[in-house]
Every structure is written in structure tokens, then in C-alpha cells.
Image (cartoon, helix red, strand yellow):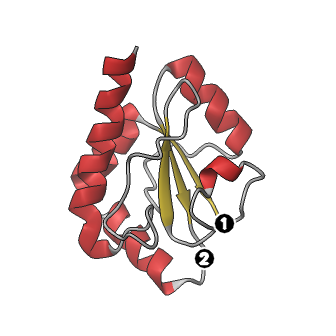
Amino acid sequence: GWGDELTWVQTYEEALFRSKSNNKPLMVIHHLEDCPHSLALKKAFSTNKEIQKLADEDFILINLVYETTDKHLSPDGQYVPRVIFVDPSLTVRADITGRYANRLYAYEPSDIDLLHSNMIKAKKLLKTEL
């Protein structure tokens, strides 16, 4: 999986609730089980120790293989894999993007360092906004 030691929330509603009540940002990973791009990102994510530690300590985590009814989670389309951050005020962080102009929230395995720095950004912005 994306990280066997990590705690994954089962529903988007529960994820939002936990993000708010624990005052931790939410990391939403949209993927498909049989998508080669999703599988490659999953492998890079699950084997990166720094990302796993950060995810474990500072984030509420959910991975979805289906789209939610929340249009804010697909600001530029429903493609996979995509990673979107939501802060505890339940605001989708549309400003935290990957490096592809045509798919703002897509990450390739080679972008794992960018994803890591975006996680740090999601964590930091949180504290300065409150």
C-alpha cells in the first residue's frame, strides 16, 4: 500500500472531521489500483522514509479510488494520481501544486522531493494562518 504503518481514514467525511478536530492538514491521494502512474507513485511514496514519517506525524491521510461529490477535490479535472491538501479550516489548498501546468495536482515518482516539500508547506502554512 501507500504505507502500511500509516493510519488511513476510510471516508472523506471522517477525514475532514479528523483534520478539524486534530488540527492537522489532510492529504488526499486519488489513485486507481490498475493505473501504472498510480502504482509508480505509490511505490515512491511508500518507500520514502521522510515522507512516511511526515505523513505519520503531521497529517490526516486518505487515499481514494473513487471521486467524491466535493468539486473542490477536482479543481482542474478528475485524473489520477493526484494529491490535494486540505487544511483544518476545511479549505482546499489549491495553491499547493505539482509541476505540471495541465495537471496541477499530479506527481510522478521523480517528483517525490517536490511532494515532500509540498507536505512541509501544507504543514507550515497551517500554523501561520491560525
For this orientation, the residue located farthest to the right is 69
* Identity of the residue drawn at 68% across and 46% down: 10
Give the mark nearest the N terminus, 1 or 2.
Answer: 2
What amino acid type should be assigned to the residue bearing mark 2? Glu
Label 1: state its secondary structure: loop
Front-lying residue, 108 or 73: 73
**Quick check: can you spot residue 93?**
yes
Q: x and y percent of residue 41 in the render?
A: 39, 71
Cβ atoms under marks 1 and 2 closer than 8 Å: yes
Q: x and y percent of residue 111 in the render?
A: 27, 68
Image-based side of 58 in relation to 120, left or right: right
Other-residue count near label 1 (Cα within 10 Å), few / some / many at <14 / 14–19 / ≥20? few
Residue designated by label 1: 65
In the picture, the disc for residue 33 is 2
Image-based side of 76 in relation to 36, left or right: right
* Identity of the residue drawn at 25% across and 58% down: 114
Give above or below for 79 relative to 59: below
Q: x and y percent of residue 1 in the render?
A: 49, 64
Label 2: state its secondary structure: loop
Spatial CA distance of label 1 from label 2 is: 7 Å
- Residue 13, quarter of the rendered image: top right
Q: x and y percent of residue 76 in the render?
A: 56, 63
Give above or below for 130 relative to 43: above
Image-based side of 90 in relation to 101, left or right: right
Other-residue count near label 2 (Cα within 10 Å), few / some / many at <14 / 14–19 / ≥20? few
Q: Where's the C terminus, which quadrant?
A: top left
